Amino acid sequence: MSERTKSSIDIAAPPEAVLGVITDFEAYPQWTGEVKDARIDERDDAGRATRVWFRMDAGALRDEHTLAYEYPSGTEVHWTLVSSNMMRALDGSYVVEATDSGSHVTYQLAVDVKLPMVGLLKRKVEKLIIDRALSGLKKRVEAIAA
């Protein structure tokens, strides 16, 4: 899955705070509108979640899916789809970079649903997911950091 949609946002908090919210998967239902339930199924030796189950309801798209997580560096979180009822792929990443005023977060996402979807519409859905996620992330991190 080579084509990805990408967007970025600046957050007034240090990278550790941003990554703390990103990796607190069980709290996602508290701040993401679409995730209704989340459960960590596996952790690595460092205690980081490596397999997470989600139940989501995004209106037209209701699904239960499991994602596999990797942490290639101290500032990156990557995931790939393990299983889903509605999607063939849900692969993405967060990259968090320190700035003078906090953090710069870049989110990349590639979604492939099992239903036929025109490429342009698929990119719009990806962009909507990313924009909502980044907005929610910023609000959550800055509220905790305040």
Image (spheres, rainbow, N blue to C red):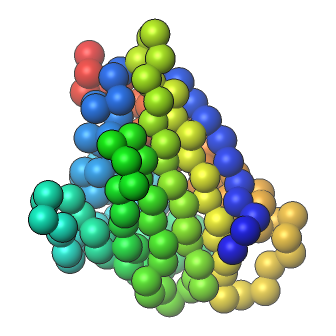
Front residue (pair 46, 112): 46
Front residue (pair 40, 30): 40
| Residue shown at 56% from the left, 46% from the top | 107
Q: Is residue 144 visible?
A: yes
The percent coordinates of residue 120 (x first, y second) are 87, 64
The percent coordinates of residue 144 (x first, y second) are 25, 27
Q: Going by the picture, which residue comes out furthest to the top?
A: 100
The percent coordinates of residue 111 (x first, y second) are 64, 70
| Residue shown at 41% from the left, 30% from the top | 139
Q: Quadrant of the C terminus?
A: top left
Q: Going by the picture, which residue comes out furthest to the front?
A: 73
Along the horizontal axis of the image, is 133 left or right of 130?
A: left
Along the horizontal axis of the image, is 95 left or right of 15?
A: right
* Above or below 74: residue 64: below
* Above or below 11: residue 30: below
Along the horizontal axis of the image, is 93 left or right of 41?
A: right
**Where is residue 141, by image quadrant?**
top left
Q: Is residue 132 visible?
A: no
**Where is residue 60, by image quadrant?**
bottom right
* Above or below 75: residue 89: below
Give the tally of numbered discs: 0
| Residue shown at 86% from the left, 75% from the top | 118
| Residue shown at 77% from the left, 57% from the top | 124
Q: Quadrant of the N terminus?
A: bottom right
The percent coordinates of residue 37 (x first, y second) are 29, 67
